[in-house]
Each structure stands twice: as C-alpha cells, then as structure tokens.
Amino acid sequence: MKGDTVLVTGGTGYIGSHTTVELIEAGFKVIIADNLSNSKEGVLDDIEKITGVRPAFYREDCTDRKNFGKIFKENGIDAVIHFAASKAVGESVREPLKYYGNNLLSLMNLIGLMMENGVGNIVFSSSCTVYGQPKVLPATEESPRLEATSPYGNTKRICEDILRDSITAYGNFRGIALRYFNPIGAHPSALIGELPNGVPNNLVPYITQTAIGKLECLSIFGDDYDTPDGSCIRDYIDVVDLSKAHVAALNRMLDGKSEKPYEVYNIGTGRGVSTLEIVKAFEKVNGLKLNYKITGRRKGDIEAIWGDPSKANRELGWKASRPLSETLRSAWAWEKHLASLEK
Ligand code: UDP
C-alpha cells in the first residue's frame, strides 16, 4: 500500500520498468536491483521523466547472494516483485545450464534473503508457458501444467514449485505467481518499452523493426494450423495493463486479503488473436503496409493459447483495459522514439 517499499528485481527490463512506473504512481517507494545484462541504466532517467521520481538503483546480480543481500541490510523492504531472469527461449535450448543456474538460483537466494530479513511478500513473474498446448481453451489456473518445451519454460515451472514449497514449509511469507500471456506494447509516453537484444524473437518487436526498416521482412511462422486463418493464436496483453496487475497483486498481500499463502493468477485479456490479425491490426491502426511473408512453422510453437483471467478480475479487482489498437499504436510510437534517439 501507499508508502511501502518494494524491491523490484529486473526493474530496468521491459516489464520491470513499466511496473516500476505504476508502483511509483500508486505511491510505493521502489528500489530496483538489476545486473543490466539485458537492459540499460538510462531507463532510470526515463522512469524519472515519466513519474518525477528516480527509483533507488543497485547494479546487482541476484545470483550473487552476498552483494544482493546488502540491499536487504540497507533498506526496510516490505515486498519484492521478482522479474530478474533470463528469458530467451532459443538461447535456453542451447545453454540450459545458464538458464537453470540463473533463474533458479536467483529465486532461491531471494527467498532465503526474504526469510532472513523478515520480508513477507513476493510477486513472482511466471508465464502461460507452464500450460504448454492446453487441451481445453481458455486456460484456467486449474489447467494442468504440461511438460515444458524449453529449458526456459521449465525454469518457470520449477520456480513456481520452489516458491510454493518454500511458502508451505517455512510459512512466514506469502507469494503470488502471475502467469503472463504475451506482453506487448509500450508506455503511452513512448519513453519506455521493449529493448530486444539483437534480432527480436517475439512477434511485435519484429513487426515494429520491420516497419521502421531495421529488418527486411517479417516471417509469419505457418498458416496451416488448425485455426480460423491458419496462423497461431495468442492472448496479447498490454504491458501497462500487465504492470497494473502487479500493483493489484501486491496490494492484495499487503492489505492482508490473500486467501491462501500461495496464489496463482492468469494475467491476460481472455481473447485469442492470431498472428495475421496482429499484423493486419498493426497496419490499420498505424496506417502503413508491412513487408511480410508466410514461411514454415517455427519449431516448438504452440498452436493456440489464450487464458481465462476471471480469477484475477474477481480477486485482484484487475482487468485488462487498453484496446489492442492503442497497444499496437504504442508499440509503433516506441519504435519511432528509438529511431529518433539513434539519429
Ligand atoms: N511469430 C511469427 N513471426 C515472428 C515471431 C513470432 O510469426 O517473427 C509468431 C509465432 O509463431 C507465435 C506468435 O507470433 O505464433 C507469438 O510469438 P512470440 O515469440 O512473440 O511469443 P510466444 O510464441 O512465446 O507465445
């Protein structure tokens, strides 16, 4: 609640920076810990431009328990939101030990430090990847978690288990895992957004980089799926809406409203949108033509997934509200902002 101090690991990253803005605007004091492995310190300036407040910043790696632990000693922390993790699916297949090492150890250190320092609340950044290809759609929190298709996906599942088991065993803290669907878009100010490292893997940054001419042509991975237009279906959630879900989850814990010590919520729109629909909507709302071609399927892709967010709507009092058109406009505004910085 207002005035509480939140440690945001990975707070200069894509979702971390947007969540930091929402936290500050909701009256929280934010401390960011980030090793800057996939983000830039300049994001702090942009957060300050948007909110008028510069969050405290520690350049630390959560796997380095000793140095990371200093943040707890030097501050009175009420809650943690844990984003810091490696997240590239393809890289995780090539370098599984990096992913297991980084993602699991970071969370284990964090839980240990929270217990040592009496910090009782954590929001964990999980993913709909834990559902694999659900047999029944939309996916609910009760849908079975299936065998992960990548080491990255497996770390999300194992991290959920580490958190659940620790809360059950040690009993002196609470946690909420938020299972994100596909976060897209940028802050309406266009000052913060997604900064992909190298050629993007994800659809929307690939689209915006193609539109601006950084990339030549978007490949649509398959139009022969068993879906209405043959392309894959996802539940695209606006990053600002997603960020607000973190504030709602924190408030649930800090206000003592959690019904169970460990809770899980789907964070999505409840609507499935195909790859081709995204491309067409992007062209329409931004008044441009995108260079794209249909190519073969991408290995490991899920055909269709969207989530049922009604538990989050009901219990967190949160609902996705930004229309897809606005989200796609914000993604384009952000790409143009980046291009203007490069000039
Ligand atoms: N996609 C695509 N071309 C790209 C990147 C993604 O057609 O260059 C498709 C991909 O096959 C999937 C959807 O866009 O159906 C979302 O992909 P993304 O990698 O963003 O998310 P994820 O597959 O992890 O849900």
Image (spheres, rainbow, N blue to C red):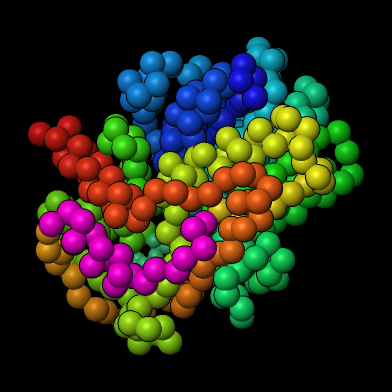
Judge left or right: residue 281 versus residue 270: left
Q: Residue at x 18, y 42 (%)?
A: 336
Residue 249, percent from left and from top: 64, 40
Residue 270: in magenta span: yes
Q: Quadrant of residue 175?
A: top right
340, 189: nearer the viewer: 189
Q: Residue at x 18, y 61 (%)?
A: 284
Residue 319, percent from left and from top: 53, 49
Say above or below: 107 vs 271.
above
Residue 214, percent from left and from top: 16, 52
Q: Quadrant of residue 132?
A: bottom right
Judge left or right: residue 131 versus residue 293: right
Judged from the image, the quadrant occupied by ligand 1 is bottom left
258, 262: nearer the viewer: 258
Say above or below: 118 vs 281.
above
Q: Residue at x 29, y 72 (%)?
A: 276
Q: Which residues are magenta?
A: 268-287
- Predominant SS of the magenta segment: helix
Judge left or right: residue 58 versus residue 258: left
Q: Is residue 95 visible?
A: no
Quadrant the C terminus occupies: top left
Residue 244: in magenta span: no
Q: Is residue 158 visible?
A: yes
Q: Quadrant of residue 71?
A: top right
Quadrant the N terminus occupies: top right
Residue 134, percent from left and from top: 60, 75
